[in-house]
Image (cartoon, grey):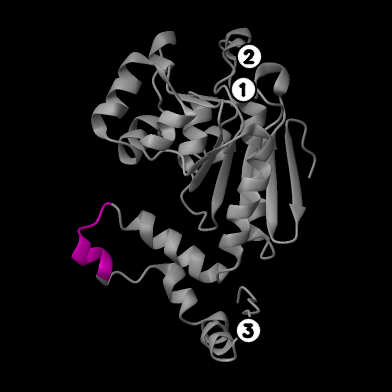
């Protein structure tokens, strides 16, 4: 895979995805979005990959969002459209594998929307989150205006979105936006710790849990509980469903096959 703006690495069952434009605080432009489409396609297709960690290069920014200077310089030009939305992820809802955002600095605008589209957020203690689009005549249209009120209390979300103000990592943790806040030097190791804990579980169980949780959000509780989602069907027809109880009975760690 020929990538210019994204670093994509694989280690065992873990994918590392890094926005690699630190000179512009990892702001995203159309070529980035298209590269990320390819990265997510590969992540989904690779059965050996169970979890992804997403972060930004450097120590200043996860992503400052849309590259407005690039947008201004190419005004009027037709942009190729990403099938998955901003960073190939904000409009993509078919990824049942867990995604961890390791937020290493500013996560603003589209950068915040990327983090919101991930399942777990680990933040460096100097990170800041915000949807400042109205300050430049835009709106958080890559899912931010919908995801933020689903993640934190409505009045807090509305206050952020209508003023464009940032919140600190500590505030994000207090409101339940971030799972954990750590020193920058511990960010990668902490994200890897979370990934390792996830990978102790059956990957098919994790995928079924993620799919059902998100797909059931818009349903009434009774309807959600009665719905048999695709990943759930796959789980209950899997070899890992047999391996889990067997390993427990034999007092050993399960040998998950993801099948």
Residue to which mark 2 is pinned: 70
Q: In the image, is residue 221 part of the stretch drawn in magenta?
A: yes
Identify which residue, 96 or 195, lies in the foreground: 195
Image coords of residue 103 (percent x, y): 58, 34
Asked if 11 appears above or below 20 in the picture, the reply is: below
Residue sitting at x 48%, y 30%:
169
- Badge 3 marks a residue whose secondary structure is loop
* Residue range of the region highlighted in magenta in the rendering: 218-225
Judge from the rendering whether residue 121 lies leftward or rightward of residue 34; answer left or right.
left
Q: Earlier in the sequence, mark 1 or mark 3?
A: 1
- Tell me, yes or no, whether the two marked residues, 1 and 2, touch with CB atoms within 8 Å: yes
Identify which residue, 207 or 69, lies in the foreground: 207
Image coords of residue 68 (percent x, y): 56, 13
- Badge 2 marks a residue whose secondary structure is helix
1 or 2: mark nearer the eye = 1
Image coords of residue 254 (percent x, y): 62, 80
Residue to which mark 3 is pinned: 252
The tag on residue 27 is 1
Q: Earlier in the sequence, mark 2 or mark 3?
A: 2
């Amino acid at each position: 895979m020929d990538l210019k703006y994204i670093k994509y690495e694989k280690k065992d069952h873990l994918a590392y995805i890094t926005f690699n434009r630190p000179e512009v605080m990892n702001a995203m432009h159309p070529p980035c979005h298209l590269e990320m489409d390819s990265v997510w396609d590969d992540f989904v297709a690779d059965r050996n990959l169970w979890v992804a960690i997403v972060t930004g290069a450097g120590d200043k920014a996860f992503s400052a969002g849309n590259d407005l200077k690039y947008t201004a310089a190419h005004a009027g030009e037709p942009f190729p459209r990403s099938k998955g939305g901003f960073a190939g992820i904000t409009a993509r809802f078919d990824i049942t594998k867990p995604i961890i955002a390791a937020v290493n600095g500013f996560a603003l605008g589209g950068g915040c929307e990327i983090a919101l589209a991930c399942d777990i957020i680990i933040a460096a203690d100097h990170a800041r989150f915000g949807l400042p689009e109205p300050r430049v005549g835009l709106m958080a249209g890559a899912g931010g205006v919908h995801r933020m009120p689903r993640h934190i209390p409505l009045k807090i979300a509305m206050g952020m979105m209508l003023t464009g103000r940032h919140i600190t990592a500590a505030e994000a943790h207090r409101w339940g936006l971030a799972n954990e806040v750590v020193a920058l030097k511990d960010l990668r190791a902490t994200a890897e710790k979370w990934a390792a804990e996830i990978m102790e579980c059956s990957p098919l169980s994790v995928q079924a849990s993620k799919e059902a949780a998100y797909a059931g959000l818009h349903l009434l509780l009774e309807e959600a509980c009665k719905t048999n989602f695709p990943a759930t069907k796959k789980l209950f027809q899997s070899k890992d469903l047999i391996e889990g109880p067997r390993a427990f009975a034999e007092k050993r760690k399960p040998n998950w096959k993801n099948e």
